[in-house]
Image: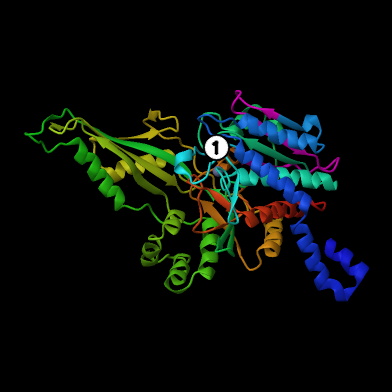
Amino acid sequence: MKYRVCLTSIGVLAVVLCAQTAWSAAQSDAVTRAMAHDIFKQLIEINTTDSIGSTTVAAQAMAKRLLDAGFPKADVVVMGPNDRKGNMVARYRGKAGSTLRPILIIGHLDVVEARREDWTTDPFQFVEQGGYYYGRGTQDMKVSDAIAVTDFIRLKNEGYVPNRDIILALTADEEGGKSNGVDWLLKNHRDLIDAEFALNPDSGGVVTDQGKPLTVEFEATEKLYADFQVLATNPGGHSSLPKPDNAIYHVADALAVLEKSPFPFELNAVTREYFAQMATIETGQTAADLHAILGASPDPAAIQRLSKDARYNSTMRTTCVATMLSGGHAPNALPQRAEANVNCRIFPGHSQEDIRTQLVQMFNDPKLTVRYRSDAGELTDHGSDRKAMTPPPLRTDVMNSLRTVSAKLWPGAPVIPTMMTGSSDSIYTMSAGIPSYGIDGVAVDRDDVRMHGKDERVKVDSYYTGVEFYYEFLKALTTGKR
Ligand SMILES: [Zn+2]
């Protein structure tokens, strides 16, 4: 739009100069920048950990920002199952009479615990240093919550009217806790957040190498999480009289089998596209191997070589790995009990129970039990039969908008669909029949991923470009009739 105004008013010769001026003006819009800064700072400095924090305080602060910007009272609510686990839902009204169903943006307000003594700076202070913003949530994911609130206000101030409603839900307990906000809203106030599809900036993002954009990744599907307890019990006895039947050996043998028994190679529409794109980015043997796994009969040697890369390995199969181990009760006694926790990330299309059964077969030891362990720590003989979601269709409106805006902000970096190897709140929206896409415009250097870790930080420039990204992206998605 700005380009066109320039063209007609100043003339063709000024096109290039004018385009640049318009672009840098947009980038350095001082009002937006100041607002974006303040919102980000405010969110980081409200403690939203499960232990002592409150998402309600953060939800109310963001609600106030939106109300102050002129959003009607009826369209901004804070609600939740208890005082500390509030969620904010705000509705940006689209064109009156639009028949298009809303777009939902979800973002979690809670953050992983962070201890002052582990950090160089105070994790709950917003600190700018050496071109970075530091603080818990600067990557995961208050950065994106701040971006969404900023852009809601910015669009509102401009008088922008989207072609459909856009709903923003900022929620509790994604990282832990018992009151997951997306789940709670879907169960108790589905009407408030019901949508044609959802955007979740908790995944996806711009991968850079020393600031140079490599890829723009968006999450189109994700793996399913499951913990299993592998347990052996035994009457035990005196350790001076060992018997062949030993609880620790049963568990140790099972884990040794697990280590050497990778789950089968699999592809789906999303991972196929991901590997195809990576084949054009990688070089040498890796590129050749990526091509070799995409053919009609994938080359086992190529699969094996690529499996050494943790990300590729995790993208091509279900993974199960031992994460905790305990056993025995005295140095001079035969163990009466040994147990391990096996953590699985399940490829879409399989259920927890499928994988539990496969582990039982793999261990092939009647002395062992393999039980599903819920997030709350309860053990059951069966896992859920719910399968990880098969990928939703890659909507052309989402894809085209993403490609257009990415090409402008990160020219040359291909847009790549990915399967998240962890899991996010999209599991709830997807289960509720709302196709969900992980789209985030915050660039992070590939060797600087600090989510959940110490000294979490984001580049100052990445943040403001992220503000620009969602602004442009939402506009691209909601302009026009369709
Ligand atoms: Zn997160």
- Is 73 one of the magenta-colored residues? no
Q: How is the image coloured?
A: rainbow
- Horizontal and vertical percent position of residue 31: 78, 49
Near-viewer residue (84 or 305): 84
Instruction: Identify which residue is drawn at 70% across, 55% down.
Output: 469
**Quick check: 289 above or below 73?**
below
- Horizontal and vertical percent position of residue 216: 60, 59
Among all residues in the image, which is located at the extreme right?
Answer: 9
Near-viewer residue (39 or 86): 39
Label 1 C-beta lies within 8 Å of the nearest ligand 1 atom = yes
- Is 95 one of the magenta-colored residues? yes
Chain part drawn in magenta: 78-107
- Horizontal and vertical percent position of residue 319: 40, 49
Quadrant of the snapshot with the N terminus = bottom right
The reply to whether residue 433 is in sight is no
To which residue does mark 1 refer? Answer: 174
Among all residues in the image, which is located at the extreme bottom?
Answer: 13
The reply to whether residue 248 is in sight is yes
Which quadrant of the structure image shows residue 313?
Answer: bottom left
Instruction: Identify which residue is drawn at 71% across, 61% down.
Output: 404
Side of 68 relative to 394 (left or right): right
